[in-house]
């Protein structure tokens, strides 16, 4: 009797905790998307579009907002959800708060400081994964988290953004490559394949280390590492084998492979003009990696990550190919405008990049609504019976 009398209360308490958890996840996701939107606005200003600027430093916050405010918060949130540790949510919470404070014009060190502290917590979460499962992929993912901490620390200390970017590239490339290595374990990779992966990762890290003192050779070494990692992923990643599966598996595979091509393009551009810290060639290099590679990965994993993180269904639709194709076309226009150089192509390519990302968000929202509608329709016969 005592047990039965307590069961409804325990169930209610569990439901409340689950609801609060979903609210926390949704709030952090909303803050990260807000950083994305404002970061894109700042990027358009940097390109040359005449848009309102409510804070003078806003254009210079484009990179930090995109890498730390959006991607860093999103990755930290994913790790917190995956581990289930409550303290892990402090990582994305601090990075989101730091981005918000920077936008509100808080004293200069405060925003970068909170973002750096948030990245330290996320790195601590990644270290727990190594203890739970010692493996090459967990070590690589943790190294990615460490490079994020280093890049943020350089930004906090007043180093040029271009130097911090070398570490931020490592953060995203190593994180993504480590996750792909984990999924490729089912292919029973040879010792040679694992050594080649380690060599590519070592080149990336060496490029960031060298570039912190000697920027041009470091950038070129990082470019070589990017090309090597892209070649490894194109050769060994399981994505190639998923294209024949059809449906969402095919979409994910095509998205991943197209992103690897952009990583290779960015690496080649870095090898070509490693000494550039600004200008069209620098823009082409960075956005080949950060936009072509990273956002292709986001497009690929959105049907899996969003339901897992937010606890809401998402219905895959072939319409997802539209934002993937438009991403590549708009980026080709932008990079071509950078390389020719032809200013209108660069300018409009950047604007189309922003519109494509907004289109991706719209497609994702529509997919969530479609999934919820399908679930409600499926429940109607059960309710009637």
Image: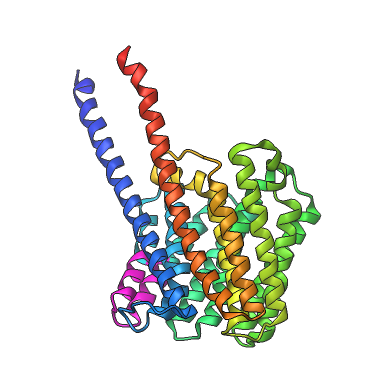
Q: Quadrant of the C terminus?
A: top left
Image position of 139 (left or right of 56): right
Which span is picked out in magenta? 95-118
Residue drawn at x 75%, y 61% is: 231
Residue 291 in magenta stretch: no
Q: Can residue 135 be seen by looking at this rendering?
A: no
Image position of 65 (left or right of 267): left
- Looking at the picture, does residue 239 appear above or below residue 192? above
Task: Place residue 114 in its image quadrant.
Answer: bottom left
Outermost residue, front direction? 344
Residue 197 at x, y percent in the picture? 72, 60
- Looking at the picture, does residue 132 appear above or below residue 63? above
- Looking at the picture, does residue 31 appear above or below residue 39? above
Residue 40 at x, y percent in the picture? 44, 69
Residue 78 at x, y percent in the picture? 45, 52
Residue drawn at x 66%, y 65% is: 263
Residue 301 at x, y percent in the picture? 54, 49
Residue drawn at x 75%, y 48% is: 189
Residue 106 in magenta stretch: yes
Q: Quadrant of the N terminus?
A: top left
Residue drawn at x 34%, y 84% is: 56
Return the residue nearer the eye: 245 or 51: 51
């Amino acid at each position: 009797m005592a047990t039965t009398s307590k069961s409804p209360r325990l169930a209610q308490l569990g439901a409340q905790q689950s609801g609060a958890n979903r609210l926390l996840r949704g709030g952090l996701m909303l803050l990260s998307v807000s950083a994305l939107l404002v970061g894109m606005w700042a990027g358009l200003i940097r390109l040359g579009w005449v848009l309102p600027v409510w804070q003078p430093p806003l254009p210079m916050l484009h990179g930090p907002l995109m890498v730390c405010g959006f991607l860093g918060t999103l990755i930290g949130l994913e790790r917190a959800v995956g581990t289930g540790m409550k303290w892990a949510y402090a990582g994305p919470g601090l990075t989101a708060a730091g981005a918000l404070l920077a936008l509100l014009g808080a004293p200069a060190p405060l925003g970068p400081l909170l973002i750096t502290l948030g990245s330290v917590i996320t790195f601590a979460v990644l270290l727990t994964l190594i203890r739970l499962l010692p493996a090459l992929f967990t070590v690589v993912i943790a190294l990615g988290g460490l490079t994020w901490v280093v890049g943020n620390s350089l930004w906090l200390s007043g180093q040029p953004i271009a130097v911090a970017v070398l570490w931020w590239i490592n953060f995203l490339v190593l994180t993504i490559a480590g996750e792909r290595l984990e999924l490729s374990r089912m292919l029973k990779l040879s010792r040679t394949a694992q050594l080649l992966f380690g060599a590519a990762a070592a080149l990336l890290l060496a490029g960031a280390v060298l570039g912190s003192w000697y920027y041009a050779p470091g950038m070129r070494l990082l470019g070589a590492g990017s090309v090597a990692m892209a070649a490894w992923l194109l050769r060994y990643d399981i994505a190639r084998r998923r294209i024949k599966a059809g449906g969402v598996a095919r979409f994910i595979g095509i998205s991943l492979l197209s992103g690897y091509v952009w990583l290779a393009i960015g690496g080649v551009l870095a090898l070509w003009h490693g000494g550039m810290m600004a200008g069209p060639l620098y823009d082409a290099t960075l956005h080949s990696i950060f936009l072509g590679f990273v956002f292709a990965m986001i497009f690929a994993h959105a049907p899996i990550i969003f339901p897992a993180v937010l606890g809401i269904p998402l219905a895959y639709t072939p319409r997802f190919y539209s934002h993937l194709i438009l991403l590549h076309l708009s980026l080709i226009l932008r990079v071509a405008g950078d390389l020719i150089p032809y200013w209108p192509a660069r300018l409009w390519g950047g604007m189309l990049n922003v519109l494509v990302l907004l289109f991706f968000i719209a497609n994702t929202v529509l997919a969530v609504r479609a999934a919820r509608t399908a679930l409600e329709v499926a429940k109607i016969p059960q309710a009637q019976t």
